[in-house]
Image: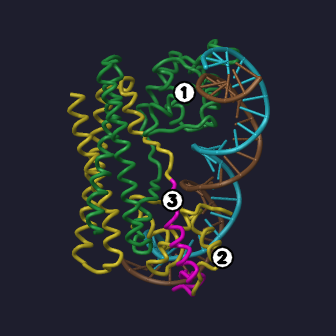
Chain colours: A green, B yellow, C brown, D cyan
DNA sequence: GGGCACATGTAAGCTGTTACATGATTAA
DNA sequence: TTAATCATGTAACAGCTTACATGTGCCC
């Protein structure tokens, strides 16, 4: 019971885009929501079973033996809207990079600089990914209904990555 | 066993600033590291007991009956440096706000705008807090050894908050 | 026929929070 | 004297990941 409402939300949301198998739900979450959300098989399969028992999704014949394609029911669509409207829970922060920099005096300046350089490189790689996604989406031009909202989350990633790069540069300068 | 290395790191780090009780460790983590780290009593007390058994910290007489003040030993200081040098683990992302905006089509535009307005207000409040901390630290001017590193983490918070504000403004404009 | 992607599911175990039980000390 | 804060600790539980077990279908 009460297995994360947020997991239900992610699963129902994925199925609202198109019907798919549990495996595909996992892949969709990894690839599409990956930069701000994650779920493992250990969450997804039990969630699918429960959602089916509750009549929020229906299982259809899959493309191969033993596989299922899940589709949202009308109640499932209603439940999705309910969950979307609920206040979201935040996870307790656990930023290992900042924890290390906070004790930078014990860590040593050169190690701090190395951490910052790595963080900057990671953020640059992320920024490139987001920019590529945006370019691809804007080139396609399809799927207008979802696209604007997806671009909102891509934009969040871009802003966050740019902020990290600027912060790393400033901090590297400050450490001399 | 193997109770989070990162918890050990946070606890040893806190005690490296000054010797204190378990309760004070919790408060220090909440108040000082709060914007990027968290630990609960259920983590801290077992960690302290284990660290003491391992000879990394020593318990001294507290200010009142039954209370202890923990101090880093030489080995503890060494262990702290080891842990600081280890690569940090990242937590799987779980951003409830972006998850909701991603499915904004189902949620509805007005609800999306409300989420963005709230996110902006939160970020503004955070930014004000960080700015106040910075002002206070720069006014004091004391504790030079740690201060530069602490300001690095404050700066990270400022950049992140400003990025969120800019993103929210852009997104509100995009949603009309 | 071998490897890879697709596919389902569970059990063990780790990490971490919450709630509770307990009590000392201080300030109003 | 009563409320708040300081202080310690644990037990129950929630949430999630990982690894494993198992098998199908496709393509080279």
Q: Are marks 3 and 2 in contact (CB under 8 Å)?
A: no
Q: Is residue B148 left or right of residue B58?
A: left
Q: Which residue is mark 2?
A: B54
Q: Position of residue B126 (x, y in %)?
A: 30, 55
Image coordinates for residue A51, horizontal then vertical, percent = 60, 25
What is the C-alpha distance between the residues marked 1 and 2?
A: 45 Å
Of B46 and A19, nearer the camera is A19
- Determine which quarter of the picture holds residue A132: top left
Residue denoted by label 1: A25
- Mark 3 falls on what kind of element? loop
Please determine if labels 3 and 2 lie on a single subunit.
Answer: yes
Q: Residue at x 60, y 82 (%)?
A: B66
Q: Residues within 10 Å of mark 3 (few under 14, many from 20)?
A: few
**Residue for point 50% across, 36% down:** A6
Label 1 marks a residue whose chain is A
Which contiguous range is marked in magenta?
B61-89
Give whichever of discs 3 and 2 has the lower sequence position. 2
Q: Residues within 10 Å of mark 1 (few under 14, many from 20)?
A: many
Q: Position of residue B149 (x, y in %)?
A: 35, 69
* Disc 2 residue crowd, few under 14, some 14–19, many 20+, Cα 10 Å: few
Name above or below for residue A22 compared with residue B152: above
- Pointer 2 indicates a residue of which chain? B
Residue B87 numbered mark, or none: 3
* Residue sitting nearer the eye, B40 or A153: A153
The quadrant of the image that shows the N terminus of chain B is bottom right
**B136 lies left or right of A87:** left
What residue lies at 32% left-to-right and 51% top-to-bottom? A164
């Amino acid at each position: 019971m009460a297995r994360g409402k947020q997991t239900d939300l992610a699963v129902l949301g994925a199925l609202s885009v198109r019907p798919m198998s549990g495996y595909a739900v996992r892949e969709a979450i990894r690839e599409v929501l990956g930069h701000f959300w994650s779920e493992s098989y250990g969450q997804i399969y039990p969630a699918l079973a429960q959602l089916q028992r509750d009549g929020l999704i229906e299982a259809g014949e899959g493309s191969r033996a033993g596989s299922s394609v899940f589709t949202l029911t009308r109640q499932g669509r209603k439940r999705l809207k309910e969950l979307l409207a609920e206040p979201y829970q935040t996870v307790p922060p656990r930023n290992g990079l900042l924890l290390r920099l906070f004790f930078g005096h014990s860590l040593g300046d050169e190690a701090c600089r190395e951490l910052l350089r790595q963080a900057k490189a990671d953020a640059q790689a992320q920024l490139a990914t987001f920019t590529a996604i945006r370019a691809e989406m804007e080139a396609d031009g399809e799927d207008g209904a979802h696209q604007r909202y997806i671009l909102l989350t891509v934009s969040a990633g871009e802003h966050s990555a740019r902020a990290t790069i600027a912060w790393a540069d400033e901090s590297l300068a400050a450490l001399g």
